[in-house]
Image (cartoon, rainbow, N blue to C red):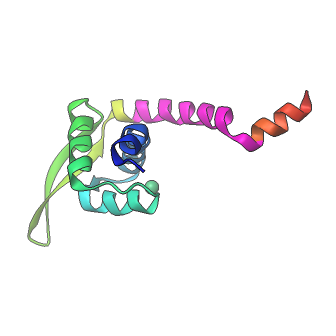
Amino acid sequence: MNTKILRDLFIGFIRIHILFHANQESVFGSALMIELARHGYNVGPGTLYPILHGLEKDGLLLSKTRVVNGKRRRCYEITGYGKDLLDKARQQAKELIEEIDEENRNVNEKEY
Ligand SMILES: [Zn+2]
């Protein structure tokens, strides 16, 4: 499948995913790439880092440099605004799933 089409379609999912994990603990690039791959999103540094920078620029994440095992690592934490948008995204995701979930649609249709 065309990588650009996939990325354009799923970039919002990826952004929400990053916010979800940043809401649990501070996150950093290489661990996020592994986590996203686990969910079927094969995102390289050339895609991930611009997303992280964009989320920070928009005020949803805040980055801090930490030194881990003698290496500098840029870690991202969610902001209050990011938490608000994550809650909103959670509601919208539920609404979307109810709309597009074929199995539930069939069940609903049988009721009428
Ligand atoms: Zn995850």
Identify the residue at horizontal 26%, vertical 56% (top origin).
Answer: 44
Identify the residue at horizontal 28%, vertical 46% (top origin).
Answer: 77
> What span is colored magenta in the figure?
83-103
| 63 left or right of 95 in image | left
Identify the residue at horizontal 89%, vertical 34% (top origin).
Answer: 110
| 102 left or right of 3 in image | right
In the foreground, 13 or 21: 13
For this orientation, the residue located farthest to the bottom is: 69
Image coordinates of residue 90 in percent, x first then y, are 53, 36
Image coordinates of residue 70 in percent, x first then y, are 8, 70
For this orientation, the residue located farthest to the front is: 1
Q: Give the image quarter of residue 86.
A: top left
Image coordinates of residue 14 in percent, x first then y, are 39, 45
Q: In the rendered view, tell whether residue 23 sits above or below residue 58.
A: below
In the foreground, 4 or 43: 4
Ligand 1 is found in the corner quadrant, namely bottom left
Q: In the rendered view, tell whether residue 32 sits above or below residue 99.
A: below
Q: In the rendered view, tell whether residue 48 sits above or below residue 60.
A: below
Quadrant housing the C terminus: top right
Image coordinates of residue 78 in percent, x first then y, are 32, 41
In the foreground, 86 or 2: 2
Q: Is residue 91 magenta?
A: yes
Q: Can residue 15 be seen in this view?
A: no
**Callout count:** 0
